[in-house]
Image (spheres, helix red, strand yellow):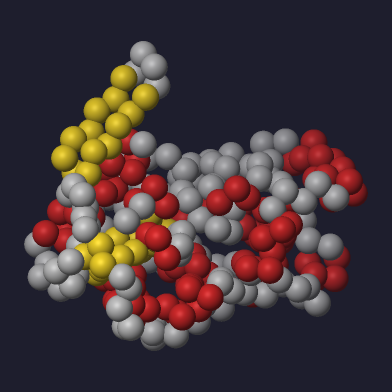
Amino acid sequence: MYPEYETLKYISRCAKNDINAPRVPEIIHFFHRRDRCLAYLVMENINLTPPPEDFHERVAKAIQWLRKCPVSPDGATLGPLGGGAAHHELFGESKAPLKFSSTLALERFLNTAITMLPPKGRSSTAPIRISHERLVFTQSDMDESNFGVDDQGRTCLFDFTTVGLLPESFASYTMALRMPFTEAVARCLDWSPTPNLQSMSRIARVLAMSSGTLGLDEDGNPINPISFQRRFKRIRKNGEAGGEANLQRLPYASEP
């Protein structure tokens, strides 16, 4: 919970200093008991009203504000500000298997997943290039319950467990997921499409089948590639598809 606390604390501070910002819950208290591995985050109570007709447009503006939120002067690292692995729908179980040391390390991980595709799909899938992209604050869980409008008419952002710094292509991928609420919000955005979208959509199958590290370390370098290749072939042969049920949500679920 500490990563969520640090992220929320920073975003809340940014929102306080910006009259155009959405409402972000203020932290009342955060405490934890190390002896029991328990943590508690107490936030202000916000009274919500039924979603207005322009709710999707409001959410789009809030997502755009979050994307433009300045990165902490302490430095930009992947994932939540308090440390730990990044959350995103692309990863197996919606969480990165590693705390990647850099965008380049994440790029190596994604391109390793391409090598795990069946031959036909592998040969027609373009390499993923994200090491040059900016890191932007991204809400990776576009569930409608993570947004609201308070009794003063301000759009609200909730659930900072799934908010963190990710390359721009990850934000675009989130908004390309085929879910009714996400699609409605995406239509209110003017984001340029990422050339990585189709390749990311194809490797989602690989990452759903194996939520592990793909035989890489946090820098994206191989640890024991031979043993992993054997393990992955066994998983694919046995059809242990972990997140296969969610593939209808992908922007491009089919392979050539």
Image position, residue 93 (x, y; %): 60, 48
For the point 58% across and 39% down, the residue is: 217
Q: Is residue 248 above or below residue 188?
A: above
Q: Is residue 6 above or below residue 167?
A: above
- Direction front: furthest residue: 50
Asked if residue 116 shows in the view, the reply is yes
Residue 116 falls in image quadrant: bottom right
- Direction right: furthest residue: 237
Relative horizontal placement of residue 196, taking residue 156 as reference (left or right): right
Relative horizontal placement of residue 213, taking residue 22 as reference (left or right): right
Q: Is residue 80 above or below residue 107?
A: above
For the point 66% across and 42% down, the residue is: 212
For the point 18% across and 47% down, the residue is: 44
Residue 244 falls in image quadrant: bottom right
Which sits in the foreground, 132 or 166?
166
The quadrant the C terminus occupies is bottom right
The quadrant the N terminus occupies is top left
Image position, residue 144 (x, y; %): 42, 65
For the point 52% across and 70% down, the residue is: 173
Residue 115 falls in image quadrant: bottom right
